[in-house]
Amino acid sequence: MNEEYSLSNLPNLKELVAPNYDNIPRSDVPKIKGIGVLTSGGDAPGMNATIRAVARAGLHSGYTVYGVKRGFHGLWNGEIDEINSREVSETLQRGGTFLMTARSKTFETPEGVVKGAKMCNVFGVDVLVVIGGDGSYRGARDLARIGIPVIGLPGTIDNDIASSEYTIGYDTAMNTAMEAIDKLRDTASSHERCSVIEVMGRRAGYIALNVGIATGAEVVLIPEHPFDFDKDVVRIILEGRNSGKRHYIVIVAEGAGKATDLAVRIEEATGIESRPTILGHLQRGGSPTLRDRTMASLMGVHAIECINEGRLNRLIVYRDGKITDIDIEEGLKMEKTISEEDLARASILT
């Protein structure tokens, strides 16, 4: 999302969008009747559970709930339908998102944002609940700035939202990767082979680091920590071979390198047969784990509690062992990275 564009020069902006809830007294805020919910960006296990929780809690509080299909693309295109309690039944255990998701180039323009706001007014969506990652939050923030109140819920497998210590889908993705790597270790040990496994994480190495610890990987490469190929990869593998090891696991986050390239380089440098495996979108699928289901459900309920109490333009977050909420502008200014302490502990175990 382009943060530099200006919405101020668009004609009749106040006639196109709802009142700015942040700049008027709470007593003057029109009564909220309709709530919209959409999923945006990459899909994540637990998104369906989040939609279900928002819908059921919203209906319980007396709101009309609307589902927006295909994310922000569907919003400005008017793909909005009312959903009821029956329609979200049997979705808790399903991966993906039944509302579907898509990326929208149109919504990255001022005109696209205004058209999305107009569609909220057309369908009576007084507050929009957005489930997604950092880019989705920026789209929600842009709507909030022109008067459409929003609530953001963290749905991304990468766990890279700075404002929250945990994101919906992260636990399932790690378990999926762990199970796949356990199977690959079995075949690597049978053939005296090095398996180079690429996991998701373009800008964040949380999946790679934690799965590396859980599977006993020999090498873990993440984008937050630059590595020396000879010292951090080749030497470790050769030291393992010299001490009697006959199979090796190298885990690389996609933002730190490509498994195909690394496998070629490792085999050339060590003479050990090396095979790349890219887990890819396999990590996005599957039935969500217990943790993702419960976190998604409780965060969804908290989103409706915020609306009930008039706390709008908020991000739902998990911090210090509890679910809470913060201002969306504040949340988007935060930064998050893997600490040196976590890296040091992982280096002891890998």
Image: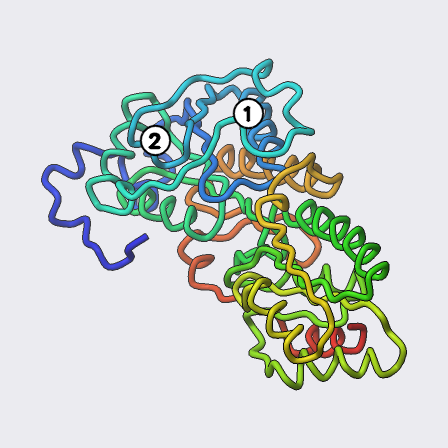
For numbered disc 2, what is the local secondary structure?
Answer: helix
Residue wearing tag 2:
75
Residue 277 x/y as whole percent? 65, 55
For numbered disc 1, what is the local secondary structure?
Answer: helix
Q: Quadrant of residue 127?
A: top left
Residue 134 x/y as whole percent? 46, 53
How many badges with numbers are in the image? 2
Seen at 46% across and 41% down, the residue is: 151
Q: Which mark is residue 2?
A: none
In front here: 21 or 179?
A: 179
Residue 261 x/y as whole percent? 55, 67
Seen at 66% across and 62% down, the residue is: 208
Q: Amino acid at mark 2?
A: Leu
As displayed, is residue 125 above or below residue 7?
above
- Comparing marks 2 and 1, which lies closer to the viewer? 2
Q: Is residue 37 left or right of residue 241?
A: left
Disc on the earlier residue, 2 or 1: 1
Seen at 28% across and 55% down, the residue is: 2
Q: Is residue 118 left or right of residue 264?
A: left
Residue 58 x/y as whole percent? 54, 25
Q: Which mark is residue 55?
A: 1
